[in-house]
Amino acid sequence: MRGLAAGILVWVAFGWSAGAHEAARNPRLMDFPATASGGLILPVDLHTHSVFSDGSVWPDIRVQEAKRDGLTAMAVTEHIEYQPHAADIPHPDRNRSFKLASDVAKSDVLIIAGAEITRDMPPGHINAVFITDANALKVDNVEVAIRTANAQGGFLFWNHPYWHRQSPDGIARLNPLQERLIAARLLHGVEVANGEDYSESALRIALDNNLAILGTSDIHGLIDWDFDVANGGHRAVTLVLAPTRTPAAIRDTLRAGRTVAWFKQTLIGRPAHVEEVVRASLSLEAGDVVEKSRVLAIKLKNASPVRYTLRLKAPQAFYNMGDVVVVPPYGEVALQVTGGVTPQTLQLDFEVLNSITAPKQTLSLTLKPKAG
Amino acid sequence: MRGLAAGILVWVAFGWSAGAHEAARNPRLMDFPATASGGLILPVDLHTHSVFSDGSVWPDIRVQEAKRDGLTAMAVTEHIEYQPHAADIPHPDRNRSFKLASDVAKSDVLIIAGAEITRDMPPGHINAVFITDANALKVDNVEVAIRTANAQGGFLFWNHPYWHRQSPDGIARLNPLQERLIAARLLHGVEVANGEDYSESALRIALDNNLAILGTSDIHGLIDWDFDVANGGHRAVTLVLAPTRTPAAIRDTLRAGRTVAWFKQTLIGRPAHVEEVVRASLSLEAGDVVEKSRVLAIKLKNASPVRYTLRLKAPQAFYNMGDVVVVPPYGEVALQVTGGVTPQTLQLDFEVLNSITAPKQTLSLTLKPKAG
Amino acid sequence: MRGLAAGILVWVAFGWSAGAHEAARNPRLMDFPATASGGLILPVDLHTHSVFSDGSVWPDIRVQEAKRDGLTAMAVTEHIEYQPHAADIPHPDRNRSFKLASDVAKSDVLIIAGAEITRDMPPGHINAVFITDANALKVDNVEVAIRTANAQGGFLFWNHPYWHRQSPDGIARLNPLQERLIAARLLHGVEVANGEDYSESALRIALDNNLAILGTSDIHGLIDWDFDVANGGHRAVTLVLAPTRTPAAIRDTLRAGRTVAWFKQTLIGRPAHVEEVVRASLSLEAGDVVEKSRVLAIKLKNASPVRYTLRLKAPQAFYNMGDVVVVPPYGEVALQVTGGVTPQTLQLDFEVLNSITAPKQTLSLTLKPKAG
Amino acid sequence: MRGLAAGILVWVAFGWSAGAHEAARNPRLMDFPATASGGLILPVDLHTHSVFSDGSVWPDIRVQEAKRDGLTAMAVTEHIEYQPHAADIPHPDRNRSFKLASDVAKSDVLIIAGAEITRDMPPGHINAVFITDANALKVDNVEVAIRTANAQGGFLFWNHPYWHRQSPDGIARLNPLQERLIAARLLHGVEVANGEDYSESALRIALDNNLAILGTSDIHGLIDWDFDVANGGHRAVTLVLAPTRTPAAIRDTLRAGRTVAWFKQTLIGRPAHVEEVVRASLSLEAGDVVEKSRVLAIKLKNASPVRYTLRLKAPQAFYNMGDVVVVPPYGEVALQVTGGVTPQTLQLDFEVLNSITAPKQTLSLTLKPKAG
């Protein structure tokens, strides 16, 4: 019945039990602070499916999921060539899903037009987003499809290059076609995290070939189920380090490769980009010296939805903690530092354990209190 | 990507965080104990929608939701006449959704063929379940549709008779057409609970007209969202008091009106039926007399997924509780009784506050320990 | 080690994990709103023990527990005659515990001087609070002790009159001595709730004899363990409906019998007093009429730490709920009302199921929206 | 009131709400599995206070806390020289607290006789446990006290050597007296974790001087408050790797230095000992190869109450996870491994991030599936 009058009852539908959960801040929301230089950290999901290819929901559910997650933008990327529901949804229009999502999203979430060019290896699956007409990509020759998407101004990336259906041992390797596409600047990014999966071989390819580092949900079913959101999970997304919250800025930033993939609480990206996210998230605050001592009380504060796991490096040591510190989302940790450190000399060298800047490598950075 | 290989990865998808939640019993599962006489209490949802009418999910999601909830059976009841997605899903076959759901459900959940005959008042919306061909109901004359569904062996019920779109003040009232259908035994039940809503005027109609009392989800979006499952909510269902777990037994039991609607933890039904569910759920156990006293320790145990709220009636009184006692799902409460009661004389008169046996009426019953 | 420097490290001790729990409002805190006429609802615990009689903690823990619970006041009421720790704590000074608690409480919690006159029946155990010297009560003749406590300006009440050690069947009954004390205005109140226990026979005595109705923790061990605070439990307290937050006002209000016992979420008291608490807690707000209907959206808001369980009475009915509604602490519930009610005509008759105004009786009251 | 009849009501006190929490396993319980060679991992707390020195609870609360935590053993270690409650508890008998704790503990928890020799630097505070008479340690000359404790068969250790009251910069340093005691085998261990605190300089001293590595609660207030047990915290303890569960075995194992401190989820000890705990806790299980691929599904299982945080090392890589994996207490994680690994060739090299084997060092170990 609600299907006939959904808009009217939404307030009631969510309202009746809402009072029980007066959290100061919805921990599900991907609400990132601005960087020190005023840049934005925009969570976007560039890979989603609906019933218009092989997904299991109408586009309106995808939009609602995106709102609940606080995404800035979501791309609609139905398979061009793979249409298992075609018997029931014989749509000739590959833009249809984007149109339906846009209609319901209004200004809450930016909906990005896209498509998944779905081929065997080579070149495998390639997403094109920020395109103008998905139908034009429905051609036999995959290179023509890719050139057309580029001609439309699209941002193109290689999906799950490690996929065991196309790489049985689960390791990503470039093939000549992809190398040619990259050389010609026709392929601009690569997924290092997709849904449940992460690939360090894909990350290696991104780093070696100057490609944007991406995380996507590649959602077919339900976000809440696949990512265990009720127990603190989150979908894989790309954090776009853009100057403004506009489609053009997001696309240009993707092109410039200023991205970090956020996957199962881990930040994956080039060191400078990961550091930008970490520095925007964390701040160090000096407190009082513990009475009759030279032990200094400090606070580590986290303004982001990321759960940080840090490791303190020599020569400093905490008085009330081992070297590993978890800083909860939108939370803080109170610590004490030994060795006679003062607010003036305080600086802590950390390894960010929930970061990956290259295969088996993490970010290290030094935090100091903000100058008063 | 998982869309292409969903079956393979399911174990992994749910497995990776499962270890953290070793609950003895999944509180979401609607797993009811048998009654004392060996009868079954079968949770069924007789009203669901998918993209094949005005729902927002493919039928496979409906089946997965039903499995997660532990439903015995789920009816697929697309609107015959209301097809807002027809531009994209121009299916002429009103059995299609049932077919797709059945294919994925296998033996886990019984999928019941159905349809929603969707008209203005009179007669409003009528669900027909246990039918053999929904296409045959696609006729202009609503009485013909109803007679056809009956001829197919269908169980028919009036949906959300209180619906404010068809009854602006939200109160259910019979009209002459419905009275005629009921008199002719062509309409067999009525929803007293639908989705977020409950109607005591609908319950009055059911009681006065010997109709089956039903609760349904009427789900269009997602069960988890509409019913706040993460915080302990549950979809509205009908508990069918059937002798066996077969389609024929369920249909016959519905016809016989041996049902209880379970809505927001409340059991709604005829007194005898509600009592059957309560007695199967709850048991009273006498413990020891508190040392040097005549105060008796007892336990109230709940073998069902229902959260019971009971009120003790005179002349008994608890020693360690007011008169209102909550017995949690699959849980128990330890109590003490004053007044010199012994295990032999122990009997407690309760009002079941989470029951409705008629408008503004609740079930009362007396519990005694089982004979040793 | 922290024992030697407790004050310094407190911030650290509680701070390190605090960030993870950014609740808008600590649900443990017994923070009641003022009444419409500006009166206060002050939670006080008039019955506590420490190692200075038969409790298991030093008085400083009692003070910390009181602060965590947000109590306005706590009485220190060691047994005068029962000193099981006397071999180790041979203190001759029955005021010692009060002195120690007062020293650490400072202005955060008002510490009330008291004592428990501990005798066999008659008269059983009697608490005297707001006394000036507990040592003066250490006399053989219990009536002398009682008269002395009264002469000191004390408020005296009968503890756990239903106690199975003194009344084997767990039922409270007055004896001639107590009747005489009451007649002489030497006994002013009675515990109807004590620790884990509630007694309707004690409530009957309070009502029949014009005594203050009291709830106390009678804590000997730890509040958190005995009352399962981690899972939402709360200690039994007395809500004092006083005009100001001063010792004199609290004592005078107790004398006047303007109290409500709050026990396991249930409010126990005279109808007018319980109603005062409920009206201060709950407010009704009319929202919009649901589009194209005459169903009215409303909200029930709860500004108190009490979990309310209400039952709607005829003639009204909800559209989206059965008759029983739970309004969570510091929370709200969104509801809809049928029958063409308007914001102007809206009024709801409720039974407050979590109230007891006499044995097996509850409060009923009518809520209307505040005049705009 | 319960103080007079506590034993009788305990079942009721904890029973009434217990039904709501049917966890398969109490996550609070420190229940460690046996090691592969049949050795035991026994959690003991060798440093506790009660009102008999500067603690805030009677010894019975300490025993109840120990039972709740599942400790094998708890030492009672009142300060010999520091008696701030002496005005109220003028006990001349330094064994009194041990006696009272032993009386209530019965066979549930082993109570170890101990004392804290409490001096300025040098030598600071020294705990002696497994002694026979604490009163004999009440002598002016600290070396005499230490020799007496040794003569009684005691195990002696240096408490919080980094304590800012005795080492203002919070860094532990040996002094000549302590060096002499160690050389003479009169001092056998050192606290590296105490209450809220951890010290890598203390760990350095332990390693350099062949001392037992210890973690203790040094509890003065309440375990639940100081260690935030309601939110998953745990007290600091020493895991004793003993062959049997007897006092003699525990003492001898402490003397042999076969210990690991468990502090804020971190295991601190010599590499071989930490590895013993980790190997007893974790097991690796090979599952199926993912269909049509050479990706191998595996499970990491944790049979211990420790929350493990592991980092995978080259050359392996996960398919569905970054390099850092959290294995929850008594839980498991499902993973997939790339690169064509088979059940026969499977082996994973991990760094145990929640371990400290020396200042700024962690344990590395290789896990293989158990031979079928």
Image: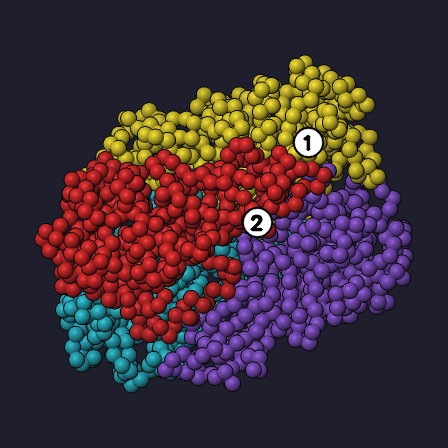
Chain colours: A purple, B yellow, C red, D cyan
- Number of numbered callouts drawn: 2
**Cα distance between the residues tagged 2 and 1:** 29 Å
Q: Is residue A254 visible?
A: no
Q: Which residue is mark 2?
A: C371
Q: Which residue is mark 1?
A: B167
Left or right of A328? Residue C251 is: left
Q: Chain of mark 2?
A: C
Left or right of D182? Residue C92 is: left
Q: How far across and down, in percent of the image, does residue C16 sit?
A: 46, 67
Q: Is residue D124 above or below residue D47?
A: below
Residue at figure coordinates x 17%, y 39% from the top left: C175
* Type of the residue with mark 1: Ser
Q: How far across and down, in percent of the image, does residue A66 sit?
A: 69, 54
Q: How far across and down, in percent of the image, does residue B141 sit?
A: 80, 21
To which quarter of the image does residue B336 belong? Answer: top left
**Residue sitting nearer the eye, D344 or D220:** D220
Q: Chain of mark 1?
A: B
